[in-house]
DNA sequence: GTCCAGGATCGGA
DNA sequence: TCCGATCATGGA
């Protein structure tokens, strides 16, 4: 454990709480029940939480978000370059949330590697810099992206929240955790339908039932090769290639995927028309094109294309 | 009224 | 293997 020098403008903390296990690049401190990342590198809250990879984070102020992660309600605030996460103690941070926010990854090095490969990605990286890929809970991510089919992001968020309110544990007054598979496996289709799931009601129940019935440990898919993990995910009803790849990228740490959503198709058929390969080859094309950061590059392009490319917003 | 949204599934060519 | 129709829902 390294001890950092105390900055002049921070007050109310015990110097004993300082720690820095991530090397000199990331300085983390526990103070007043929160975790503070000093001058956090590559962590833009809007581009991370509002880029469509997660559905349970709400913007509650300028550079301030509140989210439900597992059985916690967390606040994340950015102030003069410091990112504050709480309530959170050092142990939980190191055991879980460092991975959740992907804070062990050197995004600046990845950006350097990606820059210069492609003019559109260069623009996108410039415009939506600081986007991080979260490592979310697989079952919640799976159900959320089953809901994403032929749906829009605000409505997906509404439905995920309603499912949590109807079936999840109330962890704080008015805040509900996302339910586990055993709960949703027992849900009635008509009740799911009443929450606005539409025709996807049976996909949700079937997927939850399969997870429970076959004792599938989704977390264990992390340990499989991407293709093998994807094969398992494709076995669920309502899960096609794109949904599977979103789960792989946003919850299982698989960066060698390139989710083929409508925006990627627009980008490919428009911006990359001259290079557009037959569609099953897109992943291989972009893996080669963007290397190990392909999944991250996809999310950067997606977020940029949706919000900034055509002057929208 | 039509169109669209981080698509998947199905039947038929 | 590939193509088109269809699938709830709600906002624009």
Image: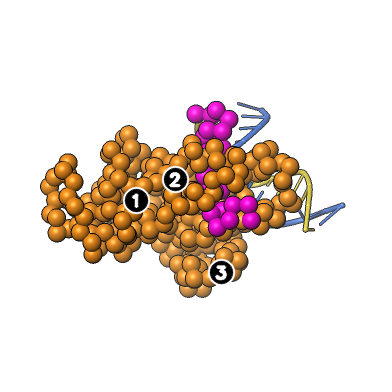
Chain colours: A orange, B blue, C yellow
Residues marked 2 and 1, same chain: yes
- In the picture of the structure, the residue carrying the numbered disc 2 is A131
Magenta stretch, residue numbers: A288-313
| Viewer-side label of 2, 1 | 2
Question: Considering only order in the chain, which callout, 1 or 3, is on the residue closer to the N terminus?
Answer: 1
How far apart in space, not on screen, are marks 3 and 1 (Cα)? 29 Å
Tell me: residue A217, above or below residue A104: below
Count residues near mark 2 (Cα–Cα under 10 Å), then give few for <14, some for 14-19, many for 20+: many
Q: Which mark is residue A102?
A: none
Image quadrant occupied by the N terminus of chain A: bottom left
Question: Considering only order in the chain, which callout, 1 or 2, is on the residue closer to the N terminus?
Answer: 1
Residue at 26 percent across and 59 percent down: it is A20
A49 or A5, nearer to the observer: A5
Question: Considering only order in the chain, which callout, 2 or 3, is on the residue closer to the N terminus?
Answer: 2
Q: Magenta segment: does it hold A220?
A: no
Percent x, y of residue A282: 67, 53
Secondary element under disc 3, as helix, strand or loop, is loop
- In the picture of the structure, the residue carrying the numbered disc 1 is A68
Q: Which mark is residue A225?
A: 3
Image mark 3: chain: A
């Amino acid at each position: 454990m390294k001890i950092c020098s105390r900055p002049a403008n921070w007050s109310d903390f015990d110097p004993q709480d300082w720690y820095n296990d991530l090397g000199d690049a990331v300085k983390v401190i526990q103070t007043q029940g929160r975790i503070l990342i000093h001058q956090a590198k590559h962590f833009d809250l809007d581009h991370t939480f509002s880029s469509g990879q997660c559905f349970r984070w709400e913007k509650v102020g300028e550079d301030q978000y509140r989210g439900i992660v597992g059985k916690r309600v967390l606040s994340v605030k950015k102030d003069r370059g410091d990112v504050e996460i709480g309530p959170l103690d050092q142990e939980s941070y190191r055991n879980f949330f460092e991975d959740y926010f992907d804070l062990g990854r050197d995004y600046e090095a990845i950006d350097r590697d990606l820059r210069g490969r492609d003019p559109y990605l260069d623009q996108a990286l410039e415009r939506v810099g600081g986007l991080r890929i979260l490592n979310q809970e697989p079952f919640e991510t799976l159900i959320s992206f089953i809901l994403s089919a032929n749906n829009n992001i605000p409505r997906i968020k509404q439905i995920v929240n309603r499912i949590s309110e109807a079936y999840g544990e109330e962890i704080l007054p008015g805040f509900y955790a996302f339910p586990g598979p055993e709960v949703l496996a027992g849900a009635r289709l008509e009740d799911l339908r009443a929450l606005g799931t539409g025709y996807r009601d049976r996909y949700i129940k079937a997927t939850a039932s399969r997870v429970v019935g076959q004792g599938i440990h989704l977390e264990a898919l992390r340990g499989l090769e991407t293709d093998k993990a994807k094969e398992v995910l494709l076995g669920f009803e309502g899960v096609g290639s794109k949904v599977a790849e979103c789960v792989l990228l946003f919850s299982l740490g698989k960066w060698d995927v390139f989710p083929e959503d409508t925006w990627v198709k627009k980008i490919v058929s428009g911006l990359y028309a001259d290079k557009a390969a037959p569609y099953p080859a897109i992943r291989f094309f972009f893996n080669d094109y963007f290397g190990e950061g392909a999944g991250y590059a996809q999310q950067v392009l997606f977020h940029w294309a949706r919000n900034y490319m055509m002057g929208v917003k």
